[in-house]
């Protein structure tokens, strides 16, 4: 991995981290997008796309609503996409899970810390905000953005290091390493299906889910 | 930059200073500032400061629909509505804008786009990623702009205007479409990730998937065993086996 690729991955990781909550919330932090671009930066977009598809199964189980605590799949998917592009083709799915899932949990925790720091920042300027000082409000916005970028930087650097470690592992010495693929896939399929059934309730939405599953099965059988 | 355009740009960062205490209140205040500055250009600094302070109080909604509140509050300020009534308007808008936005976007449009993209990936490849990003961002910018304009036009009557609009119907339909799109994607992604696997492996993955779904739906387990935790558990088990059979 060249220095340019490392810098590119870190820059993309920071952008993706900031996109989740701060701005512009343009779906760049979705695993499908983040991992595919990371794979392209690393030189293997197809592996990044596969990594993104698998992590997306987990992310579809999450509703990023307001004060709820949820994993941050963005920088995690960047690391997973990069790592997947650097390992043997037959291990892409497993490595995506091995790198992406723990990093997503850590990313979720950093998001919680970031929000607490935002609150402390507001507390320090409370008198000015309550007095209608537009400058204080602007400072809070700017500091929130910078703090989130810093959070993304830490996660992205950690992610790139993990990706490099994954690429250096002697995978050929682990004949059963493909088990990681099946564990990641089974976890993802159960996450997306369980999540869809839970949020589908008992009414028409479950019927729509069933219809989608049926059409999808027909498409697969026709291939 | 014109005040409306500046407010629109600022609405893209409405959650930059998000906190558990004020939620997106600071961001709404930041987005309202250009419109209030324009509105209070000839008023006393005290009046302007009071309006800015009101605009930055607690507020919670879906970020894409925060423009509705920004517009409505600025219109109410323009109409000379008393400060206490404006605060009540903000409070009243919080719940509905949050619920509608979550249904329309997080539980609707986003899963629709992602589900369709996952289902189309075997044929369109990475083009699906570009399509998802372009379609979503066009819709997102249009929705934010529409919300700001509805708020600016309706002021205190924005609640009734929202009820009459396409938004509640679209929110309900979007969730059904999301269920279909996600359902469509599951077998296709499963087929993609299991391509080349032996029958035993496919049976094992299906078995583990059924177990994970049962845990996700079980009364005793649904809170504790999320999809992510189940996946991490499976990975840990796989790691132990992989390491043990080196």
Image (tube, helix red, strand yellow):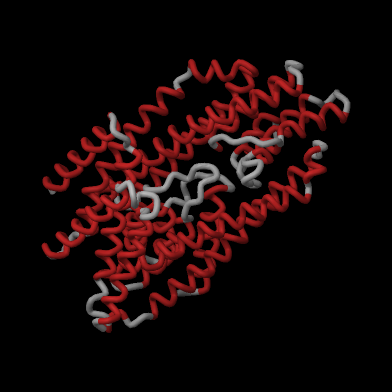
Q: Is residue B237 above or below residue A203?
A: below
- As drawn, the residue found furthest toward the front would be B220
Q: Is residue B167 left or right of residue A221?
A: right
The answer to whether residue A5 of the structure is visible from this angle is no
- Classify residue A184 by image quadrant: bottom left
Please report the residue visible at 22 percent of the width from the left and 53 percent of the height from the top.
B210
- Classify residue B67 by image quadrant: top right
x and y percent of residue A85 in the render? Answer: 36, 67
Q: Is residue A165 left or right of residue B78?
A: left
The mark tally for this picture is: 0
Q: Is residue A143 above or below residue B147?
A: below
Please report the residue visible at 49 percent of the width from the left and 42 percent of the height from the top.
A65
Q: Is residue B246 left or right of residue A96?
A: left
x and y percent of residue B225 in the render? Answer: 36, 55
Q: Is residue B217 above or below residue B54?
A: below
Q: Is residue B1 above or below residue B13?
A: above
Q: Quadrant of the N terminus of chain A?
A: bottom left
Please report the residue visible at 21 percent of the width from the left and 35 percent of the height from the top.
A211
x and y percent of residue A24 in the render? Answer: 56, 45
Please report the residue visible at 71 percent of the width from the left and 53 percent of the height from the top.
A120
x and y percent of residue B226 in the render? Answer: 37, 53
- Classify residue B227 by image quadrant: bottom left
């Amino acid at each position: 991995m060249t220095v340019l690729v490392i810098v590119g991955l870190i820059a993309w990781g920071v952008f993706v981290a900031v996109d989740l909550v701060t701005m512009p919330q343009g779906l760049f932090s979705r695993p499908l997008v983040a991992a595919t671009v990371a794979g392209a930066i690393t030189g293997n977009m197809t592996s990044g796309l596969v990594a993104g598809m698998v992590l997306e199964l987990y992310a579809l189980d999450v509703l990023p609503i307001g004060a709820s605590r949820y994993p941050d799949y963005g920088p995690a998917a960047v690391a997973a996409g990069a790592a997947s592009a650097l390992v043997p083709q037959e291990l892409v799915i497993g490595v995506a899970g091995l790198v992406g899932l723990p990093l997503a949990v850590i990313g979720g925790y950093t998001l919680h810390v970031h929000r607490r720091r935002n609150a402390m920042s507001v507390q320090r300027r409370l008198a000015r905000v309550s007095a209608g000082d537009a400058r204080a409000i602007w400072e809070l916005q700017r500091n929130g953005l910078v703090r989130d970028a810093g959070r993304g930087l830490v996660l992205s650097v950690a992610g790139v290091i993990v990706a490099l470690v994954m690429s250096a592992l002697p995978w050929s010495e682990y004949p059963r390493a493909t088990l990681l693929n099946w564990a990641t896939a089974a976890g993802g399929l159960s996450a997306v299906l369980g999540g869809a059934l839970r949020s589908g309730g008992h009414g028409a939405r479950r019927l729509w889910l069933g219809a989608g599953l049926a059409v999808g099965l027909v498409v697969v059988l026709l291939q | 930059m014109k005040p409306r355009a500046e407010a629109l740009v600022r609405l893209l960062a409405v959650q930059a200073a998000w906190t558990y205490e004020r939620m997106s209140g600071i961001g709404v205040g930041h987005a309202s500032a250009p419109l209030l500055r324009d509105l209070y250009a000839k008023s006393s600094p005290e009046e302007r400061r009071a309006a800015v302070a009101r605009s930055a109080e607690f507020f919670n909604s879906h970020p894409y629909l925060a423009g509705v509140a920004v517009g409505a509050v600025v219109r109410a300020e323009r109409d000379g509505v008393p400060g206490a009534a404006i605060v009540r308007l903000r409070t009243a808008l919080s719940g509905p804008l949050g619920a509608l936005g979550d249904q329309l976007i997080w539980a609707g449009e986003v899963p629709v786009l992602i589900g369709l993209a996952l289902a189309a990936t075997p044929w369109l490849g990475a083009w699906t990623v570009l399509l998802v990003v372009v379609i979503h961002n066009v819709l997102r910018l249009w929705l934010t702009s529409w919300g700001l304009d509805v708020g600016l036009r309706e002021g205190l009557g924005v609640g009734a205007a929202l009820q009459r609009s396409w938004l509640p119907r679209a929110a309900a339909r979007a969730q059904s479409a999301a269920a279909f799109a996600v359902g469509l994607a599951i077998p296709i992604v499963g087929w993609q990730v299991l391509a080349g696997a032996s029958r035993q492996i496919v049976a094992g993955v299906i078995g583990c998937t059924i177990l994970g779904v049962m845990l996700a739906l079980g009364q005793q387990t649904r809170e504790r065993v999320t999809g992510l935790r189940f996946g991490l558990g499976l990975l840990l088990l796989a790691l132990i086996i992989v390491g043990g059979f080196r």
